[in-house]
Image: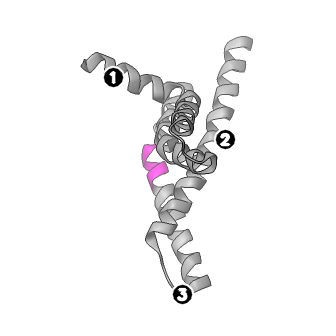
Amino acid sequence: MVDIISYIIAFIITVPFIATWLVYFVLVKWNWPKLKAFHQAVNWTTLPYIIAVLILIRLNFDVNLTGVFIIFFLAALAFIIFMQWKMNMEILLTKALKLLWRILFLLFVFIYICLLVFEISYRIFY
């Protein structure tokens, strides 16, 4: 049973596109509205994209950037909170975290695609 769970987690981290599509498909089948299902799929699969990017960078370039990413996350959260304070004079941490999480999804999907294209082209030509 533990092996099956570890294989499922490894698959989700290896191919997060399928995990995102699967979560979206299941939620739509459970009669969730499509937009809300998409938002939940993004929320639930952001972490596999982050882990997949970290692993791809480690495999391709032999560099561990976990600490750099954590510092980047905290700096981005601080910037979002600062902008909330400047615009509204009211800081809503849940709103800032949700915005950061969605920005991280977009950023890491883009980085994941770029790293996959790089890896495939590198394997073809070298």
For residue 81, side relative to residue 34 (left or right)? left
User: Mark 2 highlights which residue?
Assistant: 110
Residue 8 percent across, percent down from the top left: 40, 23
**Mark 1–mark 2 distance (CA, rounded to whole Å):** 26 Å
Please state the extent of the stretch shown in magenta in the rendering: 66-70
Can you name the residue that lies furthest to the bottom here? 89
Q: Is residue 50 visible?
A: yes
Residue 112 percent across, percent down from the top left: 61, 35
Marking on residue 6: 1
Q: Give the mark nearer the N terminus: 1 vs 3.
A: 1
Helix, strand, or loop for circle 3?
Answer: loop
Bin the neighbour count of mark 3 within 10 Å (Cα to Cα): few under 14, some 14-19, many 20 and up: few
Marking on residue 89: 3
Could you tell me which quadrant the N terminus lies in? top left
Residue at x 72% of width, y 12% of height: 124
Could you tell me which quadrant the C terminus lies in? top right
* Looking at the image, residue 58 lies above or below residue 122: below
For residue 115, side relative to residue 1 (left or right)? right
The amino acid type of the residue labelled 2 equals Phe
* Looking at the image, residue 113 lies above or below residue 5: below
Nearer mark to the viewer, of 1 and 2: 1
Bin the neighbour count of mark 2 within 10 Å (Cα to Cα): few under 14, some 14-19, many 20 and up: some
**Foreground of the two, 21 or 102:** 21
Helix, strand, or loop for circle 2?
Answer: helix
Q: Is residue 126 visible?
A: no
